[in-house]
Amino acid sequence: MVFSGGWIHECTNSDDNRPDTDLFTIDVDGSNLTDITNTIPACDPEAGSPRDVMPSWQPVFAPSDTTPPEVSETYPSNNATGVAATANITATFLEEVSGIDPNTPTNSTFKVVQVKPTGNVRVSGMASYNESSKKAIFDPSGSLAKGLYKATITTGVKDKADNELSEGYTWRFTTAGPSKK
């Protein structure tokens, strides 16, 4: 970073004591202070180091986001039982994400399959994403049959810094099946 700062010089004649303003560079962590304009004070041409430099600086750029998005909660929760057959399946993220295509019946980033008793049969439905709640929503096309289900958010989901979900996020739940009338 570059900033303007003043060298405070102690001259033999105190009337000559004055700050000399120079331009300095410094690393963001505060190391490697370098005077890039090298003003020599009128009272001391041999002066080689500042007694006091008072920079005022702030980082120009925010630190880079390298953290992948994370799921903070799901509905139903992992290993939940007795889930309503008409429930939407949701995953809430800690930050805004992209990659969950709304209204795509064959969504590749949010999948729900019935594991038992049918053996990994994909559930048809629509996936969407609500930015304000940071929630991915899978709305099944019909009621879920009684059984064990697995929901998966895949690595195609990314945050605003383009960090991809580091690995798929999977949770399981068991439905009670459609209500009988």
Image: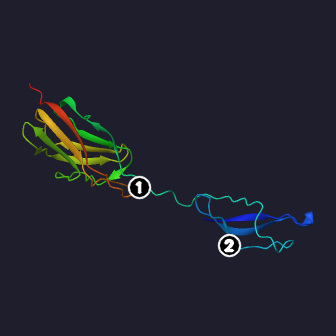
Element marked by disc 2:
loop
Q: Which residue is drawn at 81% across and 73% down?
A: 46
Query: In which image quadrant can residue 13 be found?
Result: bottom right
Residue 15 spot, x, y in % from top left: 92, 65
Classify 10 Å Cα crowding around label 1: few (below 14), some (14-19), many (20 and above): few
Q: Nearer the viewer, residue 67 or 52?
A: 52
Q: Is mark 1 on a helix, strand or loop?
A: loop
Residue at numbered disc 1: 66
Determine which quarter of the picture holds residue 14: bottom right
Position of 10 relative to 121 (above/below) = below
Q: Which residue is drawn at 32% across and 42% down?
A: 92
Please say whether residue 141 is visible from this viewpoint: no
Instruction: Please tell me which residue is depicted at 72% across the width and 59% down the height of the picture.
Output: 54
Mark 2 Cα-neighbour bin, 10 Å: few <14, some 14–19, many ≥20:
few
Tell me, for residue 86, which label it has, or none.
none
The C terminus appears in which quarter of the rendering? Answer: top left
Residue at mark 2: 36
Relative to residue 11, is residue 101 drawn left or right?
Answer: left
Distance between the alpha carbons at the discs numbered 1 and 2: 33 Å
Q: Which residue is at the front of the view, 36 or 84?
A: 36
- The image shows residue 134 at horizontal and vertical percentages of 35, 45
Q: In this view, does 108 lie above or below 113?
A: below
Q: Is residue 93 left or right of residue 112?
A: right
The N terminus lies in quadrant: bottom right
One can see residue 94 in this view: yes
